[in-house]
Image: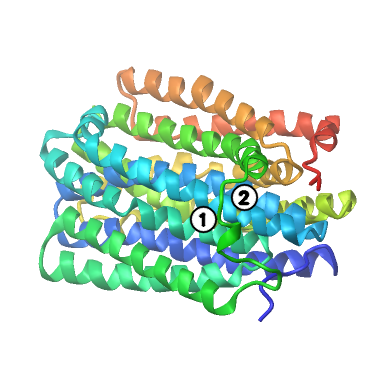
């Protein structure tokens, strides 16, 4: 069975749509997978349990963001080598990626397990939810090796142009998580700890299925155990591209954790409301994230093949497609936000407060269509440093300070605080447009060398 797909040929629009669609479905299922805990707990337990899952999932989302950043580096490198038809380099890169993430899994698991209590305290977790939040984070931390394994495997396959297999893996994880959530939380009333157990069990099953799939199908090029070693040259390239993306995703997620901590001081209702909105926003941005991921892989292959103009076409098509959906999501949220917030909580006050926050925050659904796609394009060209720089500037000089200042002002509600995110994204957009027009991204291509 063919295990890679050439993205340097054919018409751009159908090629991008065909490649992005499995990304979109996988992203939708992954978000549903992540939201299932909050959704089920919100229907069967109280606001303290909802707050625990909302706060705990922010921590796990940050870890996943860092992992995804590094795997994106691997995806781009493999895509470049595939575009240049350098199969030996692909095999060595895959082996190096396996070693890097195995080491990372061991270290990160130990750190998170040991620091669970400290992290829960730093989050300004409401007293009513402290115990449950700590339990949720601890249990999820034990499953970090499976989270890392799944994402590393998916990143490798996507670099080879295979976006369908990761879709199958996450489908299994999503179904497993929902079923086990309903049993442990809905039937056995285990609350946040039960939701955490469902999460790691689903990830474990998904990862195991992924490993079995790769072993059975194999690759069209030679790959064996001798390739699984840490090649210093390949490792440097993975970190050169992946580390800025990982830092960007990680620090941005840290910023949301900081904002959550700031808002947690406002009380249990505010804490639960922010957690609800974060889950909804993830869903509304899924199409953009899917197209952005597809753009990164397509750009990498086309730049590796020396097709710069085709790579730019991928960017424009991706922005156009995601913008259509982004505008639709924004309009719906403005018209009927409570229909979405009510899915995650039965508490009338939480539904009302979350709806206010969602209405202002949702402007981001439009702005990120440009920023996410441009970031992936620049990264696919081999320059992941600029996306990191502008994202951190917007996050730590606009989003966080603005959220903090607004939270301290008398009479301010979550509606006003919700504007902090789109304002920061707009600043990023301005910087991205300037950089794109300058043409400097052309000088930072990652050209694979023998």
| Helix, strand or loop at mark 1 | helix
* 172 lies above or below 286: below
Horizontal and vertical percent position of residue 1: 66, 81
Please indicate, yes or no, whether residue 298 appears anywhere in the rendered image. no
* CA separation in Å, label 1 and label 2: 8 Å
Residue at label 1? 152
Residue 107 appears left or right of 272:
right
Any mark on residue 99, and which?
A: none
What is the crowding at mark 1: few (fewer than 14 residues within 10 Å), some, or many (at least 20)? many
Q: Residue furthest bottom?
A: 1
In the foreground, 135 or 221: 221
Please indicate, yes or no, whether residue 244 appears anywhere in the rendered image. yes
Residue 100 appears left or right of 294:
left
Marks 1/2 in contact by CB < 8 Å: the verdict is yes
In the foreground, 3 or 423: 3
Horizontal and vertical percent position of residue 348: 22, 51
Identified at 50% across, 45% down, the residue is 362
Residue at label 2? 74
Earlier residue among tags 1 and 2: 2
| Helix, strand or loop at mark 2 | helix
> Could you say which quadrant of the image residue 254 lies in?
top left
Residue 102 appears left or right of 408:
right
* 12 lies above or below 413: below
Identified at 66% across, 59% down, the residue is 91
> Could you say which quadrant of the image residue 364 lies in?
top right
Residue 450 appears left or right of 220:
right
């Amino acid at each position: 069975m063919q295990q890679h797909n050439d993205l340097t040929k054919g018409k751009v629009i159908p090629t991008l749509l065909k490649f992005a669609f499995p990304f979109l479905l996988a992203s939708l299922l992954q978000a549903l997978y992540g939201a299932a805990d909050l959704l089920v707990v919100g229907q069967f337990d109280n606001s303290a349990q909802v707050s625990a899952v909302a706060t705990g999932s922010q921590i796990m989302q940050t870890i996943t963001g860092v992992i995804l950043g590094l795997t994106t580096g691997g995806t781009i490198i493999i895509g470049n080598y595939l575009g240049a038809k350098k199969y030996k380099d692909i095999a060595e890169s895959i082996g190096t990626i396996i070693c890097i993430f195995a080491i990372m899994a061991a270290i990160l698991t130990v750190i998170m397990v040991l620091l669970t209590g400290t992290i829960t305290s730093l989050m300004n977790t409401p007293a009513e939810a402290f115990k449950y939040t700590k339990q949720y984070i601890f249990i999820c931390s034990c499953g970090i090796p499976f989270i890392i394994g799944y994402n590393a495997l998916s990143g490798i396959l996507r670099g080879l142009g295979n976006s369908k297999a990761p879709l199958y893996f996450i489908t299994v994880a999503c179904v497993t998580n929902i079923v086990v959530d309903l049993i442990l939380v809905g039937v056995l009333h285990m609350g946040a700890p039960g939701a955490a157990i469902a999460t790691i069990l689903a990830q474990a099953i998904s990862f195991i299925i992924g490993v079995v799939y790769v072993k059975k199908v194999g690759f069209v090029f030679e790959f064996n155990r001798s390739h699984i070693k840490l090649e210093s040259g390949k490792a440097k390239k993975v970190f050169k591209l992946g580390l800025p993306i990982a830092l960007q995703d990680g620090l941005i997620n840290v910023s949301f954790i900081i904002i959550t901590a700031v808002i947690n001081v406002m009380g249990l209702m505010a804490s639960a409301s922010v957690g609800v909105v974060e889950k909804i926003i993830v869903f509304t941005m899924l199409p953009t994230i899917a197209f952005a991921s597809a753009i990164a892989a397509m750009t990498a292959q086309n730049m590796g093949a020396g097709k710069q103009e085709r790579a730019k076409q991928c960017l424009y098509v991706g922005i156009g497609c995601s913008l259509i959906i982004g505008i639709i999501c924004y309009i719906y949220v403005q018209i009927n936000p409570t229909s979405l917030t009510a899915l995650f909580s039965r508490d009338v006050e939480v539904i009302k407060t979350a709806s206010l926050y969602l209405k202002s925050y949702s402007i981001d659904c439009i702005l990120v269509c440009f920023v996410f796609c441009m970031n992936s394009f620049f990264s696919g060209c081999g320059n992941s440093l600029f996306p990191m720089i502008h994202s951190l500037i917007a996050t730590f000089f606009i989003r966080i300070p603005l959220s903090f200042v607004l939270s301290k002002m008398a009479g301010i509600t979550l509606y006003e605080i919700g504007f902090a995110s789109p304002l920061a994204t707009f600043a990023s957009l301005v910087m991205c447009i300037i950089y794109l027009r300058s043409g400097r991204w052309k000088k930072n291509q990652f050209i694979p060398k023998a």
